[in-house]
Image (cartoon, helix red, strand yellow):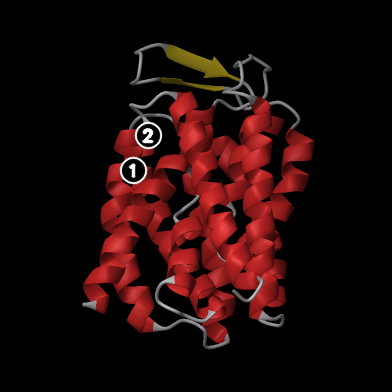
């Protein structure tokens, strides 16, 4: 029964995570700790493995649709990976409650940042890492360039650190960094984030595995469910409006932030 329940949760996490570009960690970590009473560090390790699976499955859809900006993803991933190493080493040394509190604060911050933006960015041609794609929601071609690349690269280190620290794959920060700071349209941001989170999460997962926090009882069923859900999420994402995607993302972040804050406080 537990195996089936874990798979079902993971399917939902895969759909949501791939749909908004965060890899499912915002679902996996809170559910494992709050519902299944899994230790936070084991939950984080499981989440990182699931993020790798989400990234692999989602890219089969996003790359086919031409939405993934491969050059941008590779430009940001070096600093993100370095941040993931630092975050993973830190996470195995500090208490579970601190991790839960950090998780809640990060989720609230990301939701606030995206709400403050008030909708998707207006794409501009900048001459830097330019790309284009056809939006399946309305059939129009969206052409854009990247802004403030240097700032985005620096902030990517922070995104990677968050990934290693709380098992998010960094997507919770990568999405607003690329969308809000770098001016990349939301759907291209989600697609590119799904590409990057796999490499980032794999770095953190190796550290947690080396410290003995990967438990096959949770990792196997969750990975199976994530692979199934992550193939559906991108198909939904490309058909929804950017505003719908953004609002869904913010609501989900706030719900799980409240749950994790409650657990961190000892209730």
Q: Is residue 126 above or below residue 88?
A: above
In this view, the residue farthest toward the top is 140
Name the secondary structure under disc 2: helix
Name the secondary structure under disc 1: helix
Q: Is residue 177 visible?
A: no
Tally the numbered discs.
2
Task: Provide residue 168's location: percent of width, then percent of height.
Answer: 55, 59
Task: Provide residue 249's location: percent of width, then percent of height.
Answer: 50, 40
Residue wearing tag 2: 237
Q: Nearer the viewer, residue 85 or 256?
A: 256
Q: In the image, what residue occupies the spot 49% across and 74% down?
A: 43
Q: Is residue 41 above or below residue 146?
A: below
Task: Provide residue 13's location: percent of width, then percent of height.
Answer: 38, 55
Q: In the image, what residue occupies the spot 63% across and 76% down?
A: 266
In screen coordinates, is 207 left or right of 116? left
Q: In the image, what residue occupies the spot 52% across and 81% down?
A: 39
The CA distance from mark 1 to mark 2 is: 6 Å
Q: In the image, what residue occupies the spot 38% across and 60% down?
A: 53
Residue wearing tag 1: 233
Q: Is residue 131 visible?
A: yes
Mark 1–mark 2 CB contact (< 8 Å): yes
Where does the N terminus fall, quadrant-wise? bottom left
Q: Nearer the viewer, residue 215 or 108?
A: 108
Q: Residues within 10 Å of mark 2 (few under 14, many from 20)?
A: many
Q: Residues within 10 Å of mark 1 (few under 14, many from 20)?
A: many
Q: Nearer the viewer, residue 217 or 152?
A: 217
Task: Provide residue 117's location: percent of width, then percent of height.
Answer: 66, 27
In this view, the residue farthest toward the bottom is 212
């Amino acid at each position: 029964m537990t195996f089936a329940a874990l798979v079902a949760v993971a399917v939902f996490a895969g759909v949501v995570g791939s749909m908004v570009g965060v890899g499912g960690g915002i679902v996996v970590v809170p559910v494992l700790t709050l519902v299944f009473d899994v230790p936070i560090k084991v939950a984080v390790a499981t989440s990182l493995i699931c993020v790798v699976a989400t990234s692999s499955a989602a890219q089969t859809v996003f790359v086919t649709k031409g939405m993934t900006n491969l050059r941008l993803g590779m430009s940001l991933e070096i600093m993100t990976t370095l941040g993931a190493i630092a975050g993973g080493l830190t996470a195995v040394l500090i208490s579970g409650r601190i991790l839960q509190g950090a998780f809640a604060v990060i989720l609230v911050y990301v939701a606030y940042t995206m709400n403050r933006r008030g909708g998707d960015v207006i794409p501009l041609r900048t001459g830097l890492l330019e790309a284009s794609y056809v939006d399946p929601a309305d059939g129009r071609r969206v052409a854009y360039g990247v802004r403030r690349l240097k700032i985005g690269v620096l902030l990517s280190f922070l995104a990677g650190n968050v990934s290693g620290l709380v098992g998010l794959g960094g997507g919770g920060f990568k999405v607003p960094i690329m969308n809000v700071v770098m001016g990349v349209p939301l759907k291209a941001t989600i697609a590119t984030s799904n590409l990057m989170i796999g490499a980032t999460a794999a770095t953190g997962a190796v550290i947690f595995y080396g410290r003995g926090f990967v438990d096959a009882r949770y990792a196997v069923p969750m990975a199976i469910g994530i692979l199934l859900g992550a193939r559906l999420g991108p198909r939904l994402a490309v058909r929804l409006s950017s505003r719908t995607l953004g609002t869904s993302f913010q609501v989900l972040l706030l719900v799980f932030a409240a749950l994790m804050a409650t657990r961190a406080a000892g209730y």
